[in-house]
Image (cartoon, rainbow, N blue to C red):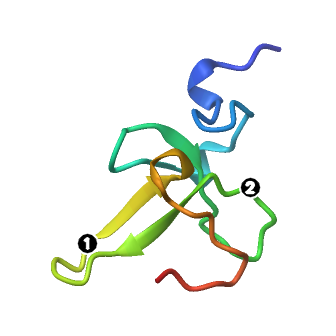
Amino acid sequence: MTTDASDMCEVCSEAMDPDHSAFCSSCGRTFHLTWDTRLEIKDCGAFALDDQTLALYFTCVLCGGAPQEAGEQPS
């Protein structure tokens, strides 16, 4: 069985579950992002809340998004 390129993280080049991924708001890359902190899934970026617009945005580590530790709240 081959892995489709769309199923690969564009940050670490490893296979990922599409249910636990995000698109970087800076560069558009698809990367690992844990939606359920109870699961041990690799994070290749982070999410944050914009205080002015109250929008949730995602940033890969290549654009400066530090991965969150399990259970840690975004800043």
Read off the residue under disc 2. Answer: 42
**What x and y, as percent, mark residue 65?**
50, 59
Name which residue type carries label 1: Ala
Rendering coords of residue 25 (x, y %): 33, 50
Residue at 56% across, 44% down: 31
Amino acid beneath label 2: Lys
Q: Using the image, determine if residue 20 lies above or below residue 10.
A: below
- In the rendering, at what x and y percent does residue 24 appear? 41, 48
* Residue at the spot 73% in from the left edge and 20% down from the top edge: 3
Q: Which of marks 2 and 1 is nearer the N terminus?
A: 2
Give the answer, above or below, for where 5 lies relative to 54.
above
Q: In this view, does 1 lie to the left or right of 23?
A: right
Is residue 2 left or right of 48 when viewed as pictured? right
Q: Residue at 61%, 20% (x, y): give it.
A: 5
The image quadrant that residue 18 belongs to is top right
Q: Name the residue under label 1.
A: 55
Residue 66 is situated, as x and y percent measured from the top left of the image, at 57, 64
Label 1 residue SS: loop
Residue 35 occupies which quadrant of the picture? bottom right
Q: Distance between the residues labelled 2 and 1?
A: 24 Å
**Relative to 2, is 18 above or below?**
below
